[in-house]
Amino acid sequence: MNAKLVKLKTLHIELTINRILALGISVISIPYILRNCGNGNYGLYLLIYSISLFLTVSDLGIGNGLVNEFASSKAYGNQKRINEVLSNLIVFGVILPIVIIPFAFLALRVVDWMSLFQFNLNNRDTTTSLIVCFIGASMTLLGSIALKMLLANSKDRLYSRIQLLISLLTNMGLIISSTNQSPLTGMVFSSLVLPQLIGIICLVLTIKINQNIKINLRKFSIRIVGKLIVSGRVFLFLQIAYIINYQIDALLIAHFLGPVEIAEYSVVLRIGSIPFILVSAAVQPIWASTAYLIAQSKESKAIRTLYISLRNVMRFSILSMCLFLMFGASLIKHWTFGQIDPSIQLILANALWIPISCAMQVFAMYLNGAKLYKFLLTSMLFFSLSNTLLAVLFLKFFSNLAGPIWSNSISSVLFFIIPAVILTNKRLNYKKGIFYGTKKN
């Protein structure tokens, strides 16, 4: 038992280190990319990247539901089901580009990109990068199958290492591409197509190495694909909500203020997100431990674990907020070689968002572990509507670049954190406040 516990702790430490390394690679590369291509091209790149994420919903939620599908088939020893699902996914993954790429060319002709995002399609590099964006988005399902299989088979270490490799190669590609006279196409290819190509290579190797996998592309079944879509519908809704909440900002900023402003907004947000990313890695075990404890009817212990974690996370996040307020502006200016000189309003908004986002992540891990998907869907729906409307209000009437961060913080507190506190207190029979003990079973 002790040996197993040590092994799990070692795995968790390695996964955390890999995530920190991936973050470090991204943080180091950004100033060089900015200096090479300028704020304008970097802002356009971020805008195209955000557009691509909206297109990833074309897999209809199948991608995010694959882990459960593969894990349940493995648990029942149903290799035939795994082979059927894999065969149908590969065929469906090939069909998606065939449908989406013609749609891309149609969108280039029909959509008024200049009115929507101040996007000039007379530039060949811009037009080509948008087409590459559509191609990369259409490959998302095929590129994710092998990695989802690793998660389903509890091969977290290998999954983490592949993700780290993808991060390294992507950022190297971004740095190299940014030195070109027309950098956009290469940058979009590096971040949207290259990771999918690596995922497809992993899929081919998995099929060749694992002799139990038998692919039969002739037995494509609409019924099987339909069942996968139905089983992944919750993940589709959550995926749409996530994209709206965290990618709509770039589109709104481009529409109201212009793509060049996205660079400053994104860079400040990237630094402000470091505590959130570290917290995400630290609290990941809450998901599994909550599911385990609730299955054993130990709800009071689950709630104590939740709020002990929340107290520790809040201490860390408040310290991070204070440090960001004091040193954030000067750090970002020096880090980007003077390319970005953030306003005090943007620094203040990001600083206040740090503890709010960290608290959200702690509650999200608990809610997922408790399988409270109905609450998550309802909360995210209201959160998305509020976040979008408030962001439009701030940007349209105040032309405030910090507006989307304020809208995110306000919506997070009103439609996620407060309801989550009320729900957990009601569900788990809390007698006292948030930082007190719980009633024992």
Image: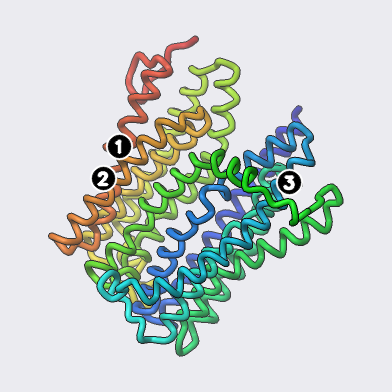
Residue depicted at 64% across the width and 67% down the height: 197
Q: At numbered mark 2, what does the secondary structure look like: helix, strand or loop?
A: helix
Q: Is residue 334 left or right of residue 89?
A: left
Q: Amino acid at mark 3?
A: Glu
Dot 2 amino acid type: Ser
Q: Residue at x 32, y 30 (%)?
A: 419
User: What kind of element bears circle 3?
Assistant: helix
Extreme bottom residue here?
181
Between 260 and 9, the residue placed more toward the observer is 260
- Mark 3 → mark 2, Cα distance in angstroms: 42 Å
Where does residue 290 sit, x and y in percent of width and height? 54, 27
Residue receiving disc 3: 84
Residue 92, horizontal then vertical, whole percent: 62, 56
User: Where residue 300 sits in the image (x, y, percent)?
Assistant: 48, 17
- The colour scheme used to paint the residues is rainbow
Q: Is residue 243 above or below residue 183?
A: above
Q: Kindly identify which residue carries mark 1.
A: 415
Q: Nearer the viewer, residue 98 or 301?
A: 98
Q: Secondary structure at mark 1?
A: helix
User: Mark 3 vs mark 2: which is more N-terminal?
Assistant: 3
What crowding class fits label 3: few (fewer than 14 Cα within 10 Å), some (14-19), or many (20 or more)? some
Q: Are marks 2 and 1 in contact (CB under 8 Å)?
A: yes
Would you identify the image quadrant in which residue 415 lies?
top left
C-alpha distance separating marks 3 and 1: 41 Å
Q: Earlier in the sequence, mark 2 or mark 1?
A: 2
